[in-house]
Image: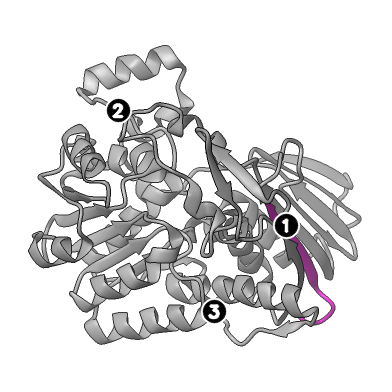
Amino acid sequence: MPKTIRIAQVGCGSLAQRGTLAHLACDDVKDRVQLVATMDVIADRAKACMEKFGAEEWYDDYDELLEKADIDAVTIASPIGLHYEQVMKAVEAGKHVHCNKTITTTVKEATDVIQAARKKDVKVVASPGGRAGSPIARRTRDLIREGILGKVYWAQAGMQFRGHEYEDFRVADDVSVSVDPTWYYKIGGGPMYDMGVYQLHLITSILGSARKVVARSGIGLKERIFKAKRITVEMDDNTLLLLDFGDSVFAFLFAAFAAGEGAATFYISGADGSARADYSSMEFWSTRIPEHHKIEKLDYKGTLRFVDQLGPAHHAWRLPTEERELLKKSLGLRALPMGENHVFNDVMHLVHCILNDEEPIVADNIESMQHARHVIEIIEKGYVAANTGRAQELTTTF
């Protein structure tokens, strides 16, 4: 087993540049993982990222990367519609894989990945596995286990924002950052695969495998504009799911490319208590505690255990601007990691599993690909339910 995992970045867009590439450029990871190559279909972008983040070489052809690059693994951040083919090619080439959400768009494709990885004896980690170990998930599971909520009735979660054409990252005209967001509005894109996946990982890690789904879904804005380019929207940008977990336990989930300030993050209700949470605190009410009402600050310690053990650059987003600049100069970096810590945690989870020959377990014996496949089936069957007006049975578990 190699002492240092040699990895290639596939897809050098917004997520890669703000997250994985910037993290991989830091010296404190290089005893475990080395950035060997960058790959993007835009050659100038792949080359610019190689130079900016200290890779050894660049490619604009994925097949050539797999054939020629001296790598052990890939981290994939290309458009979602490309993931299945790219993951399967990497597995067939004997490479370990981390893939950003969602790793596939259908349950059959996810099953193919699981079976192929077993056959080739390679590790596969699917983002966003960290949601299962988030403070909201952990504390809610405790409240249920301790009986504070009583018999669970229903939960709610959702994510939304206006759209990727509004991201600051894409504003400049430089080829390395002017990344066209058109694919988010074509088949394989949409807010469910892009954002709803996070909350589905959260909800199912708390309530377990869902049994049925019904849905409503459609296109709100028929056209989007990015730098004067008109984008015809072909993928639903507004989706609502109702999940049935059995025993009269239900959950409502929404995902939309719409303004989202003030939208609820998470809520759960039981026979004896209820709780709601944002990213900083959890508030709950219960007849089973003396004070009846309590607010707790959420503890993020250990949430991203493969990033938490690294140096200050990996947490630079928490620092004031002046301190960031001082840190960047002191470390000799051209860019600091300014986001996507959860994605890099999944990358380092893969590295850890390869180095220690462990299976990717995201939390409480939840295996990465099994969980990801179940969430993908919910999304896939959700669209079927919306199109047919009929509840859809779910067949996978984790």
The verdict on residue 394 being magenta is: no
Classed neighbour count for the residue bearing mark 2: other residues with Cα under 10 Å, few (<14), some (14–19), many (≥20)? many
| Residue type, numbered disc 2 | Ala
Q: Residue at x 30, y 35 (%)?
A: 176
Q: Which residues are magenta?
A: 243-256
> Badge 2 is on which residue?
335
> Badge 1 is on which residue?
254
Residue 223 in the image: x percent, y percent? 64, 47
Residue 382 in the image: x percent, y percent? 68, 73
**In-front residue for pair 263/302:** 263
Furthest residue in direction top, as rendered: 322
| Residue type, numbered disc 3 | Phe
Classed neighbour count for the residue bearing mark 3: other residues with Cα under 10 Å, few (<14), some (14–19), many (≥20)? some
Q: Earlier in the sequence, mark 2 or mark 3?
A: 2
Residue 21 appears left or right of 365: left
> Badge 3 is on which residue?
398
Q: Residue at x 81, y 74 (%)?
A: 249
- In the displayed structure, 208 sits above or below 290; it is below
Residue 160 in the image: x percent, y percent? 67, 47
- In the displayed structure, 250 sits above or below 98; it is below
Q: Secondary structure at mark 2?
A: loop
